[in-house]
Amino acid sequence: MIVRDILDAESRAPMIERDILEAECRALMVERDALRRVRDALTAQRDAVLVKHDALLGSTSWRLTAPLRAALDMVRRLKPRQDA
């Protein structure tokens, strides 16, 4: 009887391990799908920001104020820093 119990336990072990691995696999697939959704949302957000950025750089006001920004940059470079 003891030998039979041992053999039964040994024969069930691979099935139990398989069930555990299948459960882990399902959990990983759920996590993968969630991460894909996050990735897709972030990609859409990035694309929207790029569209706004391109629109800003192509706008009339950005082009008209370019000389002013360049002059301010030049003044900032020439002005001694007073960090200390």
Image (cartoon, rainbow, N blue to C red):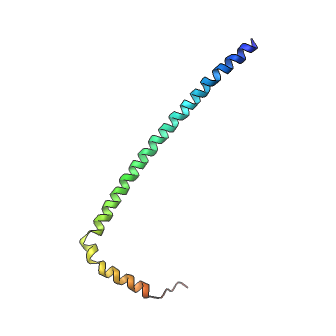
Q: Would residue 48 appear left or right of 81 to someone viewing this image? A: left
| Residue 50 against residue 44 in the figure, above or below | below
Question: The C terminus is located in which quarter?
Answer: bottom right
| Residue 40 against residue 18 in the figure, above or below | below
The residue closer to the viewer here, 21 or 61, is 21
User: Which residue is outermost to the top?
Assistant: 1
Q: What is the quadrant of residue 6 in the picture?
A: top right
Q: What is the quadrant of residue 79 in the picture?
A: bottom left
For the point 49% across and 41% down, the residue is 31
From the top left corner, tell me how far across and down residue 70 is, in percent.
34, 81
Q: What is the quadrant of residue 51 in the picture?
A: bottom left
For the point 61% across and 28% down, the residue is 17
User: Which residue is outermost to the left?
Assistant: 60
Q: Would residue 70 appear left or right of 59 to someone viewing this image? A: right
From the top left corner, tell me how far across and down residue 9 is, in percent.
68, 20
From the top left corner, tell me how far across and down residue 44 is, in percent.
36, 52
Q: How many marks?
A: 0
For the point 47% across and 88% down, the residue is 80
For the point 53% across and 34% down, the residue is 25
From the top left corner, tell me how far across and down residue 16 is, in percent.
61, 25
Question: The N terminus is located in which quarter?
Answer: top right
| Residue 24 against residue 47 in the figure, above or below | above
Q: Would residue 33 appear left or right of 55 to someone viewing this image? A: right
